[in-house]
Amino acid sequence: MHSLSAEQCEEYRKTILNHTRDLGIEAAMRKYDIDVIMGAPTGRSATIYDAGGYPVGTLPLGYANFNGRAFGLSFVVPRGREDLLVRVMGAWEKLLNPRKPPSRL
């Protein structure tokens, strides 16, 4: 097993923050005047949002017909804007039909 020094850990942390924030999500939000990113909560997006420290919330949309698995929609807002996340999710939820609980397995 290979151990990282404290300096290496700090260098990697700064690189991750730079790529997820300065060169990534925050750069895109500023450039295109984006307040909220919506998308499927799959793939690497959750890892990128988490690494950058972004608030993320997911609302259920329904269940797949072929296996009953739940699927949803994620909302991402700028860091420190949890208030916006709650408002957006509340507004979106009002547009959807009431959530149906999953069937018993």
Image (cartoon, helix red, strand yellow):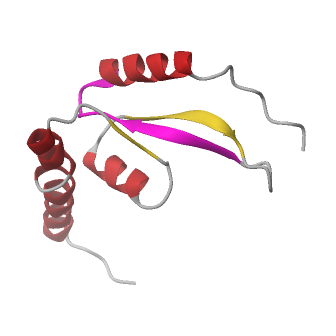
Where 12 falls versus 83 (above or below)? below
Stretch of the chain drawn in magenta = 70-82
Q: Nearer the viewer, residue 102 or 48?
A: 102
- Percent position (x, y) of residue 33? 14, 35
In the image, residue 105 lies in the stretch drawn in magenta: no
What residue is drawn where x is 18% and y is 54%?
24
Q: Quadrant of residue 57?
A: top left
Q: Quadrant of the N terminus?
A: bottom left
Kindly give the residue lying farthest to the right in the view shown: 105
- Percent position (x, y) of residue 31? 9, 44
Q: Quadrant of residue 77?
A: top left
In the image, residue 74 lies in the stretch drawn in magenta: yes
Where 8 falls versus 90 (above or below)? below
Residue 67 appears left or right of 49: right
Q: Quadrant of the C terminus?
A: top right
Where 3 falls versus 25 (above or below)? below
Q: Quadrant of residue 61?
A: top right
Residue 93 appears left or right of 19: right
- Percent position (x, y) of residue 98? 68, 19
What residue is drawn where x is 22% and y is 54%?
20
What residue is drawn where x is 90% and y is 38%?
104
What residue is drawn where x is 58% and y is 41%?
72
- Percent position (x, y) of residue 62? 68, 38
Residue 37 appears left or right of 26: right
Kindly give the residue lying farthest to the bottom in the view shown: 1
